[in-house]
Structure formats: C-alpha cells, structure tokens
Image (cartoon, helix red, strand yellow):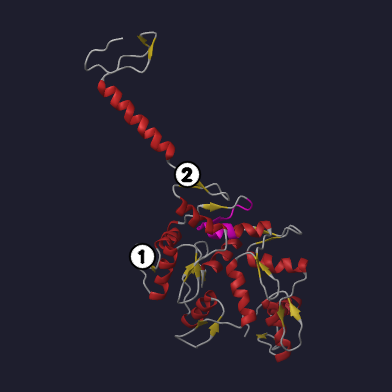
Amino acid sequence: LAFKTGEIKCENMEFGVCSSTPQTSSDILQTDVQKNTTKKTSKKKTHSCSECERIFSNEANLLKHQRTHTDKKPYQCSECGKCFHLSNSLQIHQHVHAGEKPYHCSECGKSFSQKSHLRIHHRIHTGEKPYECSECGNSFRTLGTFLKHQRVHTGEKPYQCSECGKSFIQPGHLRIHERIHSGEKPYKCLEYCGKRFSQHMNLCQHQIIHTGEKRHHCLLCDKKFRDNFELQSHQRTHTGEKPYKCSECGKSFTVCRSLIIHQRIHTGEKPFQCSECGRSFRDKGTLRQHRKTHTEEKPYYCSVCGRNFRHEKTIHKHKCINNGLYTNDVGSEA
C-alpha cells in the first residue's frame, strides 16, 4: 500500500483496510502521552505494611511506620532519656525542655508545645469526642485514650514489670510502677513545700491544695472539682452511667479505678502493705484508715454526744443507730 506524504501510518491495518477511525497527528500524539503516563503509573511502586496493610509511596516512609509496630525507638532525648520512633517527634518533644509553647488556644489562651496537643485541647471547648467504644458507648477525645480504654474490656495487660512480674494495661502505668522499686520521685513541688512525687499528675493535684483552685464545675449542680477526672466521675452520679464492667462477675462501676480495685477481690491481690504490722490491703484508702489504729487518731467528732470516731462510716452508723438523738443535730464533724 502506498501512503501520501504527511499521512500517518495506521497500526490497525487489516487486509488493507483500517479497522479504526482515521487519526490525525494530534490524535496520535495524545495517544502516546496517555501510553507514557500509563507506563509511569504502572512503574510506580507501592509499599505495603505486612502488619496493618497501610500503603506508603516509598520504602523510607514504610520503614518509619513499621517502628510503630515494634519497640524500636532509635531517637533519644539527651535531656530526659525518652525515646521516639521518628526524628521529628524528638524535635517536637524538645520544645518541652526549652519551655517553648508556640501554639495558643484562641478560646482560653492556654499554650502548647505541640500543634497536635492544641488540636486535642480544642475538643474540651467543642465537647467533641470522636472515638466511641462499641462495648460500653463511652467516648474519648483522643485515639490513644480510646485504645487504652479498650484493654479494660479485653483484660489485656501487655506491659510487665521485670522486677515483680506485675502486668499493666499501659506502658505509662508500668513506668510509674517501676518507681516503687527504684524509689524515684522526679516531680517536686518547687513553689510551696518541696514535697516530691512519682507522678506528674499527683504533683499537679497536690499543688491545688496550696492554691485551692477548682476550675472544673458541673453544669447540672454547679459543684466544683480540682480536675476533669473528678468532674467526669461526679457527672455519672447524675446520669447513673456505669461503663466499667467486671468480666468475672458482671458488676459495673462509674470509674475505672473502682473496677481495678474490685478485680483484686477475684485475684486476691493486696498491693498496699502497712509498714507497722505488715498487714496488706486492696486499696490505698483502706490502708490509710487502718494506719489510724496504730496512731489512735480519731478525727470524726460527734457534736451531740462528744465521742470521737476513727472512720467516717463509723460515725455515720452511730448517728443512724441513735437517730432520735440527731433529729435536730446541725453540728458538723471535726
């Protein structure tokens, strides 16, 4: 077959007849561009994580991501020794030591060292809790808190103490527990009394004793509380909500701490020991009450009969038994 000059040879010639619509030079150019683009796309490699099937555009990002599935944290802070999966996570963390807080809340003016912390803080003002537990319906502001909460239902305790073998739901709980063995108390009340604490949260709660500050108030009864945890626990007295259920007996509780203490009935665990007599208890509050038997301390005073009692529940029982005597009692307990 002969082709005139300027014509484009058709690749679809069959028995001397073109099997497709005649193409111009621009049509052919467009087709070539599409073919080249397709080839480039097909050559583009995708890197998939074998643990969670997330896909990454390059191997470097995949390797960084895979550290989240392991304990490998190669980037260590020279100030406090804390380790991180990523170098930029370490850089962000170092703002804490430098005292830098460049991210400010437009609602209340509070400042943060990390943008992500500000974003989470904003949810306090908006009330947003995007992570909901399918087991109990409880909602959470952060993904991390939600994932930790789920272990309450599963009973999973993946973090074990190398000293005593005790296991914990969260790595932070293990770190705090390990300070019992080491005696470490890194948090000091600098402004007021110099008392030291093993947990930063305990220091913050302690400092409120000096300031008397109660920033968190209940919208239903206007009662005020020192921290948000106390407020949330209180609010369940209005709603009747008991989201924490014992997997052994089915009993439910308003706060997670009550469930943990209750579970010790089933396990027999009594981690709080009296230094005077060696007797052990399931919770710290019962140990405190017990210690009064050694000191003879009786702080609860009956204004009607003048008797003193060691425990609040004992004076309450005393008043119930002698109810007739206390009809007009307006006195307060010392």
Dot 2: element: loop
Query: Where in the figure is residue 303, as x and y percent of width and height?
Result: 66, 85
Dot 1: element: strand
In the shown orientation, is residue 279 left or right of residue 176?
A: right
Residues at discs 1 and 2 in contact (Cβ within 8 Å):
no
- In this rendered view, identify the residue nearer to me: 210 or 191: 191
In the shown orientation, is residue 37 left or right of residue 332?
A: left
Mark sitting earlier along the chain (1/2): 2
Identify the disc placed on residue 46.
Answer: 2
- Seen in the picture, residue 34 relative to 184 is either above or below; the reply is above
- In this rendered view, identify the residue nearer to me: 323 or 132: 132
- Seen in the picture, residue 107 relative to 301 is either above or below; the reply is above
Identify the disc placed on residue 237.
Answer: none
Instruction: Give, as a single range, the part of the protein colored magenta.
Output: 135-148
Residue 260 belongs to magenta span = no
The C terminus sits in image quarter: bottom right
**Quadrant in the picture for residue 17:** top left
> Residue flagged by tag 2: what amino acid is it?
Thr
> Residue flagged by tag 1: what amino acid is it?
Tyr
Does residue 58 show up?
yes
Residue drawn at x 66%, y 72% is: 161
Does residue 241 show up?
no
**Residue bearing mark 1:** 103
